Amino acid sequence: MICKVIVDISNGEVDRIFDYLVPDGLEIEKGDRVLVPFGNKKLEGFCIDKAETSDFDVSKLKPVISKLDEFTCISEEMLALMRFMKEKFYLRYIDCLRLFIPGQMRGGRVRELKRLYLELAAGLTDEQIQKLIPARALRQKELVERLKQGGEYLSVVTEEFGAATVNSLVAKGIIAKTDKPVYRKPYGDVGGSIGKVTLTTAQKNAVDAILNGEKTVSLLYGVTGSGKTEVYMNAIERVLAQGKTAIMLVPEISLTPQMLRNFRARFSSGVAMLHSGLSQGERYDEWKRLLTGEARIVVGARSAIFAPLKNVGLIIIDEEHDASYSSESNPRYITSEIAGFRAEYNGGKLVLGSATPSIESFLLAKRGEYALVSLPDRISRHGMPEIKIENMAQELIAGNNGIFSRRLEAELRKTVENGNQAILFLNRRGHSSFAMCRKCGYVAKCEDCDVTLTYHSVDNVLKCHYCGKKYRMLTQCPECGSKEIRYGKIGTQRVVEELEKLFPGVGILRMDNETTTKKSAYLDILGAFKAKEAQILVGTQMIAKGHDFPDVTLVGILDADMSLYFSDYRSAERTFQLVTQVAGRAGRSDKQGIVILQTYSPNHYVYRFAKNYDYLGFFEKENNAREVTGFPPYSTIIRILMTGEDDEEVRTCAKNMFVDVRAYELENKSEFLFLQARRSPVARIEKKYRYQILMRIKREYETLVTREVYRIINENKTRGVSVFAEINPQSLS
């Protein structure tokens, strides 16, 4: 028997299938991890197929050394997904396969955790046990009675009854010791119980439309607070009743514990969690529970789409518009494409949920390619909170050069005095966006990345938000020696400092990447805010979506323009989505909410539509603009990104690549709308120089041109230069 193996090396030169002999007596199945000889080394690999014969001389084939796991870790479905991803996203086999298992399984760095377990030995009657235990050994008798109710871990029993009692019973053969797996449970006993919720008519109709409709994909378009989560859980209940499994994806890790709490309350231990914030052991245990079928629902961020579930009946992508569902580091992929493949493979359903769907998704729904399911009203008796737009240019003219407009400060005071809560949103962490010399204009930049450093006042350091490197804060300019240092735009740290001056003694929490480095930090901060240990929560996009706090009556958006003037065709869409999502955190229960939006562009059409929660109006305007200008979804953007530590090598590779792309474009002008080669806007990250080739393709030629681009990349690969292809990337920086 021949075993076809992908060796575990992420290198294009060895990203191909190698044939190995399966020795007699060794049972290997497709999807098994194996140890194989490779050159003069022993390497791990994956058996992706088996065959009776080989195209190579069998006498020269080497045998598989061993099977690495007691179980098959990759299913037929995931092997099919691997082939789909390789072709669709120009990925290596091994980079796909690594996504399907916990990373620490490779190299045997994580295994099942086992502890000694005690239970009564089999085959002994009560009479036999009584004869073996002396009459005065009361503790031994108590322990036997305890173990009749069920086994227990040795450490627990020893602490309660003492080692002498345990050892005596083991020596007499009354108690047996075995190794038993210990489940490392993420977030401990987060959960609880919730009563059965009675669905509204709109929610019932939504569940029926999703599960009984003809379309595989449904777009659930529901305003914030309309009860989408309850629709998700009811749909999952019905799928589980059919013997199937479900995947529930959320865009931010910060939302995962909250969603996990809701799902554990409803589905108990049948829920597992997968995301990058888990410990190695927790991730392995959760993955194993899904693989064995002990858990039938997975809740998690983007990577949970690769959960090893079988017979997937329902996949839900909540906040489907969120950019985090596109992987922008190797391996690059689009989560909705993976979800679509898995739904089709299993004959299941895919739900894309959002209050502000992406232009692409809503257009497909309007065209009838997706089923459009709507939840137009909030569950609470109050409607959407009123959005008041504050012109910060007028604030400056009036002499207010502070962070907060006069109206926002007044509303904050009212909120605090009334015992309610407020959320302040600013999508910029740190104290200030840069440190600059007033005299000569010098701006502190990272030595390894072509970006300015952000000042963090708590640690009094300058930090690079790309590579994480820290620098001492400037006391004087390194160029001219001046001590006149000014700071750039404010960040969340600075906001908290200003609030503490305005509201001494009021509890204030901050939630951003700086305050959530510990795994439990999300739960701790959100739990404290929900328990009203603080009245004001300041945060970045982590707090913008999904959270439900009944006492939040005020939301302040401090710099709404931040995402509006990016040189990106999605900037207006992202601003509308962000404003609508953040605004939706206010007034979600019986208390009326208000939103204060601070901007220097109060007349911009994005804010006009956002103020009225007019997604349909915004969609029509934005969709028309995309159609006229030929941007997605009316075209496809392809980016070839090249990175490497030698600037000249990367530039030469980019030139060679561009020559071939240009030659193809000249022969096929009707397929192209735009083609350009240039240094990337962020020219260097982590000491690696970056160049890119950008092209905009007519939508109908996407598959044809993509394949040609992949061919050109293969023919122009250069040692020392990494090349990535991206379809409709979320960022062009």
Image (cartoon, rainbow, N blue to C red):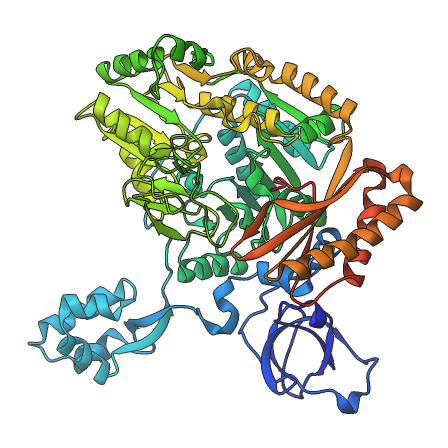
Residue placed at 51% from the left, 35% from the top? 233
Task: Answer yes or no: is residue 270 visible.
Answer: yes
The residue that appears at 46% across and 61% down in the rendered structure is 284
Q: Is residue 530 visible?
A: no
Side of 623 where 195 appears, left or right: left
Query: Whole-percent x and y of residue 63?
Result: 67, 86
> Which residue sits furthest right?
667
* Front in this rendered view, residue 440 or 454: 440
Decide: is 155 above or below 343.
below
Question: In the picture, which quadrant includes the C terminus?
Answer: top right
Camera-side residue of 144 and 616: 616
Q: Which of 42 and 207 is in front in this view?
A: 42
Q: Is residue 575 above or below residue 400?
A: below
**Furthest-bottom residue in view?**
59
Query: At which x and y percent is residue 454?
Result: 40, 41
Q: Position of residue 98 (x, y in %)?
A: 59, 62
Residue 555 placed where, x, y %? 39, 20
Q: In which quarter of the image is the N terminus?
A: bottom right
Instruction: Kindly indicate the quadrant of the structure image that contains residue 627.
Output: top right
